[in-house]
Image (cartoon, rainbow, N blue to C red):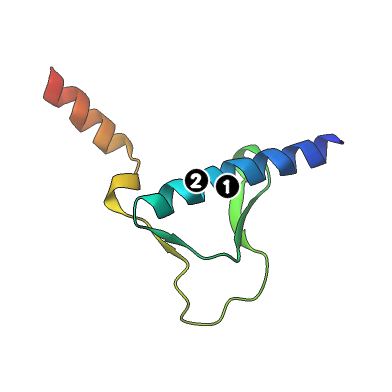
């Protein structure tokens, strides 16, 4: 397996885990979306045409990650 194939395999595992988490929490990720790239160049791309109006991602509040949330939690425990 080349480095690129290894990176692609890792991206696929990371993406599957992320999609599973979001969907288990009641969210949605369009099946035509996929994680590609690496490091700061990593992003979500469409791997096939998506009809206009299709829902791409619905992120439930329980899956939202932000620095503000972490800061609020730390301040609440201090």
Q: Residue furthest right?
A: 2
Which of the pair 54/74 is nearer the observer? 54
Q: Tell me, yes or no, whether the two marked residues, 2 and 1, touch with CB atoms within 8 Å.
A: yes
In the rendered structure, the answer to whether residue 45 lies left or right of residue 22 reads right
Depth check: 78 or 63 in front? 63
Q: Secondary structure at mark 2?
A: helix
Residue under the image location 73 percent in, 44 percent down: 8
**The C terminus sits in image quarter:** top left
Other residues around mark 2 within 10 Å, as few (<14) / some (14–19) / many (≥20): some
Q: Position of residue 11 (x, y in %)?
A: 65, 43
Q: Is residue 54 left or right of residue 16?
A: left
Residue drawn at x 53%, y 43% as measured from the top left: 17
User: What residue do we see at 44% from left, 72% from top?
Assistant: 55
- Residue corresponding to mark 2: 18
Query: In the picture, which quadrant includes the N terminus?
Result: top right
Where is 49 relative to 19, above or below? Answer: below
Neighbours of disc 1 within 10 Å: few (<14), some (14-19), many (20+) = some
Question: Percent from the top left, x then y, of residue 76?
Answer: 12, 26
Give percent across and percent down for residue 77: 14, 20
Position of 2 relative to 42 (above/below): above
Q: Which residue is mark 1?
A: 15
Residue lying at 57% horizontally and 47% vertically, measured from the top left = 15
In the rendered image, the vertical position of residue 52 relative to residue 56, given as above or below = below
Real-space CA distance between mark 2 and mark 1, rounded to the nearest whole angstrom = 5 Å
Query: Farthest front residue?
Result: 24
Hey, which residue is sitting farthest top in the picture? 78
| Placement of 19 over or under 57, stated as above or below | above
Q: How many numbered marks are there?
A: 2
**Residue 28 has which mark?**
none
Residue 3 placement: quadrant: top right
Element marked by disc 1? helix
């Amino acid at each position: 397996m080349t480095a690129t194939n290894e990176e692609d395999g890792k991206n696929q595992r990371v993406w599957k885990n992320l999609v599973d988490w979001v969907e288990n929490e009641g969210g949605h990720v369009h099946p035509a979306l996929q994680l590609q790239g690496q490091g700061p160049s990593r992003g979500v791309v469409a791997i096939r045409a998506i009809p206009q109006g299709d829902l791409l991602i619905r992120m439930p509040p329980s899956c939202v990650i932000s620095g503000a949330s972490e800061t609020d939690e730390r301040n609440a425990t201090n």
